[in-house]
Image: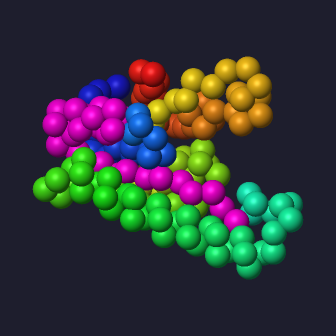
Amino acid sequence: MGEKKIERILCAIDFAENSKEIVDYAKTFQKAFNCEIHVIYVAPTLSQYIGFQISPSSIEDFVGEIIKGAQETMDKFIAENFPENHKVKGEVLTGYAAEEIINYAKNNQIDLIIMGTHGRTGIDKILFGSVAEKVVKSSHIPVLTIRPLT
């Protein structure tokens, strides 16, 4: 089977407290393999708000503001966590998180996905599911999941 190459890592974050811990693992892999890191955040898409008693144009404005704010947060996050590192790029995507992570990995020849879990249990897990669980079940490449320490 041979040696596996790790040239590109997808690091999926949500800007929660454990996002720094997740990128620390990505940095460890980067040091070992001299690979690229693609940090992504998936913002909710417009269609996820349909059904609320809000006009579509208001929803569009709202989602646009979320994406703009997320891009600013991403730029700051990259600057703080990867200073002077030219093999890192940050992107904000929109859609359903698990699908977007899987699609991004396929479209960018990603070799490893690193992401956090929220450790949801009970009714939260039933209602919201787990993005990490969906990615692990759907991914054709290895997924390293990091559970928050708190």
Q: Is residue 65 above or below residue 45?
A: below
Q: Quadrant of the N terminus?
A: top left
- Colour scheme of the picture: rainbow
The one of 80 and 23 positioned closer to us in this rendering: 80
Q: Residue at x 57, y 24 (%)?
A: 119
Residue 12 visible within the image: no
Give the magenta part as a residue range: 20-46
Q: Residue at x 47, y 53 (%)?
A: 41
Q: Position of residue 12 (x, y in %)?
A: 45, 44
Q: Is residue 26 magenta?
A: yes
Q: Residue at x 29, y 27 (%)?
A: 2
Q: Is residue 116 above or below residue 34?
A: above
Which image quadrant is residue 135 in?
top right
Q: Quadrant of the C terminus?
A: top left
Q: Position of residue 64 (x, y in %)?
A: 58, 72
Q: Residue at x 27, y 35 (%)?
A: 24
The mark total stands at: 0
Q: Position of residue 130 (x, y in %)?
A: 64, 33
